[in-house]
Image: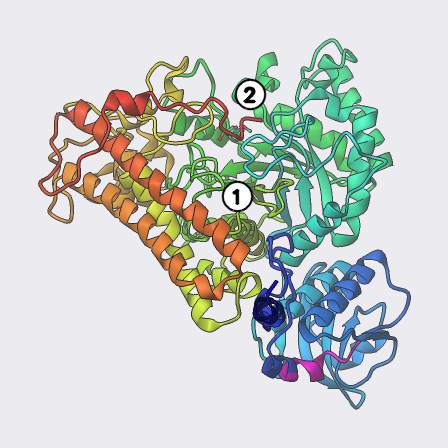
């Protein structure tokens, strides 16, 4: 090599790497990256991170808290703090009333913190200026440690720190739809993280990182397996596998739950029926609970999908949901376990509007569930669509503990390819006033138990976690796990604030980058609504895998599996009439909403075609006809997807190369697929309606036949 080339090569080698990109970023570390702060920020933080104080013998949970603080401080400041027992200046002090009885002298509002809350406060204690993390339990300290690290990472004012945080919801759970063969139903992030085959003997460090990530958000429960469950999961070998996971997750405050198949004892041939009122069946479940609690003393309980989509349930024996749920609840009650009984039911032989069936079945049972049963209700009455009005059961069962079930994995919002930050979707549901009370009764008030004074509260998110390196199949999808966890802790948290918080920990602490990325996130869900299912349309997705448009599908066995059932488009108009002249689903809502939803003129545009079948020339608020408005929404969706991509390209210099490129590729796909969605839907609606595209609107490049011919036999997520 000529000398000048050698010098050039050396120069390239020793060019100072931009500090931020010195570490390869593949997303594995999630929002717990702890990259070095800039020198100014380090100078601000250092005086507050000199040492970690814990008095006494640390439990595994306290060890986890300390290890996280050490890891975080070392990463952020480049120096590991020492762990000491006595107070000293600049220390972070972890204290419970048991570990440090002297806490008493500080007269802190400890009682208000409850079991899991924490307090972070900068104060003078016995002549030392310290940062106190105080809680009534070790897990409260762990949550506090994560909160302190979050404050450091997001530029919080450590010198004036004074935070008191208490979870508003008791059970903050992930529901994994993970099968025993390691496939994941509606999973787009690779195989299940649970390596069932290798368990219980062989563990995986991923389980610990999973636990850390959840604990950092306050998630305290994980239902390990798919709600479409198998009897085997309750056999000895599988209980042992679940117990091994429980041992790993326990120090992080996470309890395990199992999804159970209602017919298990009968399927295992240990009873002759699964009838919940048959004493031998109840006895089998009692004995099974005893066996589980022997292996997992803090087992959370059972999650159950019964009499829904072909799953067995109490109705197979002429019993109702309460009979089934209570029988299981009584088996768990002596051990402190709960039953999460899903309200996602619709029956193959019930011709009632599918949107009404859950309410029709569950509302009459209000008051008949045992105290340790929670009825788990999806956010909308159909199925995790890009937008649905809130589920009418929320607020309508005052005598029953109700959990809100959200879907973090994006079955209907572009899998792990499209950017759709779900914060705004979750927030929209939680903030909705159910109108069951004059003074306001939001879904958040239902979920946190404050509306009807329920002591048992829960929120569940269908996980988007798999064994892909980035956990969630894409970098932005990590934000959906994040926002779910943080909103389960505080259902009134702001989607925008949480997006910013996530960006600051995940991509950059530069305020300009934070706001640019958060802007993208906040626009993304509405973009998806517009290019997939605007104006209250729903379930237009292709069959089975739900990838891409399929508004023409009309040949599936059950009417309510066909998109044509949901949009009802023909020459006369479009939309599902759920008003008083139609299915009257509006009658399931509180009177305040009944009035609004019954009349198309008062129904908000975003729910219009959910509740009404209207002529194509229906005059919209904007002055446009419905048809022109619909086309406009599809076009706006395409434009927004294109804009997301463009915005990202402007951020190139600010994002590390690997995550930039991986995200850019996905946004390119989203832009293309948004166009496909718009074109395919509009071509179809033109054909069925006989309407022509408004002047100046772009025609689709393919014919309806060509769109119909597009197939994806191997699309992921079918489990
Ligand atoms: O959304 C539908 C999904 C099914 C899922 C079901 C449910 C686990 O398409 O895959 O089954 O909901 O929530 O039970």
Q: Which residue is mark 2?
A: 307
Using the rendered view, name the quadrant where residue 695 is placed. top left
Residue in view at x 85 percent, y 67 percent: 98
In this view, which residue lies farthest toward the top? Answer: 272
Residue in view at x 65 percent, y 40 percent: 467
Using the rendered view, name the quadrant where residue 203 is placed. top right
Magenta region, mostly helix, strand or loop?
helix
C-alpha gap between disc 1 and disc 2:
24 Å
**Quick check: 310 above or below 337?**
above
Mark 1: secondary structure:
loop
Label disc, if present, on residue 408 of the rendered structure:
1
Relative to 345, 225 lies left or right: right
Q: Where's residue 249, x and y in %? A: 76, 47
Total number of numbered labels? 2
Using the rendered view, name the quadrant where residue 229 is placed. top right
- The residue segment tinted magenta is 43-51
């Amino acid at each position: 090599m000529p000398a000048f080339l050698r010098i050039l090569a050396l120069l390239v080698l020793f060019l100072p790497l931009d500090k931020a990109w010195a570490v390869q970023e593949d997303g594995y570390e999630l929002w717990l990256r702890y990259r070095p702060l800039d020198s100014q920020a380090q100078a601000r933080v250092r005086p507050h991170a000199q040492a970690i104080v814990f008095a006494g013998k640390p439990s595994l949970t306290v060890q986890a808290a300390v290890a996280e603080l050490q890891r975080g401080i070392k990463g952020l400041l480049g120096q590991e703090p020492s762990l000491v027992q006595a107070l000293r200046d600049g220390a972070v002090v972890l204290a419970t009333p048991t570990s440090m009885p002297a806490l008493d002298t500080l007269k802190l509002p400890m009682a208000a913190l409850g079991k899991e809350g924490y307090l972070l406060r900068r104060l003078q204690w016995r002549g030392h200026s310290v940062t106190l993390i105080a809680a009534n339990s070790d897990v409260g300290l762990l949550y506090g440690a994560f909160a302190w690290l979050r404050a450091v990472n997001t530029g919080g004012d450590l010198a004036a720190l004074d935070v008191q945080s208490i979870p508003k919801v008791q059970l903050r759970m992930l529901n994994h739809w993970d099968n025993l063969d390691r496939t994941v139903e509606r999973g787009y992030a690779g195989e299940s993280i649970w390596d069932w085959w290798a368990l219980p003997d062989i563990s995986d460090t991923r389980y610990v990182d999973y636990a850390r990530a959840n604990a950092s958000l306050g998630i305290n429960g994980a239902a390990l397996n798919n709600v479409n469950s198998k009897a085997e999961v309750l056999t000895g070998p599988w209980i042992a596998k679940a117990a091994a996971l429980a041992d790993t997750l326990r120090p992080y405050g996470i309890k395990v739950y199992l999804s159970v198949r209602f017919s298990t004892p009968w399927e295992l041939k240990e009873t002759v029926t699964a009838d919940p009122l048959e004493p031998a069946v109840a006895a089998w479940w009692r004995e099974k609970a005893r066996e589980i609690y022997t292996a997992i003393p803090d087992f959370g309980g059972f999650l159950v999908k019964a009499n829904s989509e072909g799953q067995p349930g109490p109705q197979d024996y002429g019993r109702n949901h309460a009979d089934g749920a209570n029988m299981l609840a009584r088996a768990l009650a002596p051990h402190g376990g709960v039953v999460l009984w899903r309200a996602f039911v619709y029956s193959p032989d019930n011709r009632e509007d599918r949107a009404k069936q859950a309410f029709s079945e569950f509302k009459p049972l209000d008051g008949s569930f045992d105290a340790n049963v929670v009825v788990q209700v999806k956010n909308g009455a159909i199925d995790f669509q890009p937008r649905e009005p809130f589920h009418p059961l929320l607020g309508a069962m005052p005598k029953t503990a109700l959990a809100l079930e959200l879907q973090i994995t994006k079955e209907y919002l572009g899998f792990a390819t499209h950017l759709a930050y779900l914060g705004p979707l979750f927030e929209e549901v939680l903030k909705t006033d159910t109108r069951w009370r004059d003074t306001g009764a939001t879904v958040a008030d239902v979920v946190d138990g404050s509306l009807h004074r329920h002591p048992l509260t829960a929120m569940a998110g269908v996980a988007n976690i798999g064994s892909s390196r980035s956990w969630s199949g894409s970098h932005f999808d990590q934000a959906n796990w994040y926002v779910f966890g943080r909103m389960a802790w505080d259902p009134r948290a702001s989607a925008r604030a949480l997006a910013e918080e996530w960006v600051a920990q995940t991509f950059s602490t530069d305020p300009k980058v934070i706001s640019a990325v958060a802007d993208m996130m906040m626009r993304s869900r509405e973009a998806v609504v517009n290019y997939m299912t605007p104006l209250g349309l729903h379930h237009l997705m292709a069959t089975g895998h739900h990838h891409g448009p399929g508004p023409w599908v009309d040949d599936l066995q059950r009417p309510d599996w066909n998109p044509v059932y949901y949009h009802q488009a023909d020459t006369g108009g479009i939309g599902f009439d759920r008003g008083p002249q139609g299915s009257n689903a509006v009658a399931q809502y509180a009177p305040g909403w009944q009035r609004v939803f019954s009349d198309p003129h008062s129904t908000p545009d975003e729910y219009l075609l959910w509740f009404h079948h209207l002529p194509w020339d229906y005059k919209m608020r904007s002055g446009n006809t419905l048809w022109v408005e619909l086309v406009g929404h599809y076009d706006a969706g395409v434009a927004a997807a294109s804009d997301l991509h463009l915005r990202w390209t402007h951020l190139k210099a600010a994002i590390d190369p690997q995550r930039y490129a991986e995200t850019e590729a996905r946004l390119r796909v989203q832009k293309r697929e948004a166009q496909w969605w718009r074109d395919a839907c509009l071509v179809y609606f033109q054909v069925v309606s006989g309407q022509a595209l408004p002047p100046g609107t772009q025609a689709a490049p393919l014919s309806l036949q060509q769109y119909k011919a597009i197939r994806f036999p191997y699309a992921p997520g079918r489990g």
